[in-house]
Amino acid sequence: MPEDKKAFLGIMFECCRVYSRIYKNKEGTHYVGSCPRCGRRLKVRIGEGGSGNRFFRAR
Ligand SMILES: [Zn+2]
């Protein structure tokens, strides 16, 4: 299966002020990942906040 270029979401983890990406889960319902510094888990429902929003702030 070819790589889906939209299969990730850019995240600013405000807990550690670090930018990272989180990726689609296998069900395709959420983007899931964790902060690369502190490991805090993040889950964002796909489609939340309208279309075309490729950037998200984690507070
Ligand atoms: Zn963090």
Image: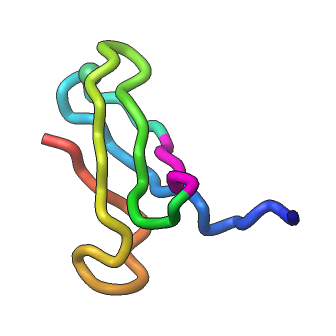
Q: What x and y, as percent, mark residue 43?
A: 30, 47
Q: Quadrant of residue 26?
A: bottom right
- The one nearer the camera, 14 or 44, is 44
Residue furthest to the top in view is 38
At 43% across and 21% down in the image, what residue appears? 36
Residue furthest to the front in view is 27
Q: What x and y, as percent, mark residue 53?
A: 37, 74
Q: Main secondary structure of the magenta part?
A: strand
Quadrant holding the N terminus: bottom right
Q: What x and y, as percent, mark residue 54?
A: 43, 67
The answer to whether 59 is drawn above or below residue 39 in the figure is below
Question: Position of 24 compared to 31: left or right?
Answer: right
At 30% across and 13% down in the image, what residue appears? 38
Q: Is residue 51 magenta?
A: no
The answer to whether 20 is drawn above or below residue 39 in the figure is below
- The one nearer the camera, 52 or 4, is 4
The magenta span reads 21-26
Tell me which colouring the rendered structure shows. rainbow
Q: What x and y, as percent, mark residue 55?
A: 37, 61
Q: How many marks?
A: 0
Question: Position of 17 compared to 8: left or right?
Answer: left
At 32% across and 42% down in the image, what residue appears? 12
Question: Position of 15 compared to 21: left or right?
Answer: left
Q: Quadrant of residue 14?
A: top left
Residue furthest to the right in view is 1
Q: Is residue 24 magenta?
A: yes
Q: Which corner quadrant of the figure contains ligand 1? A: top left
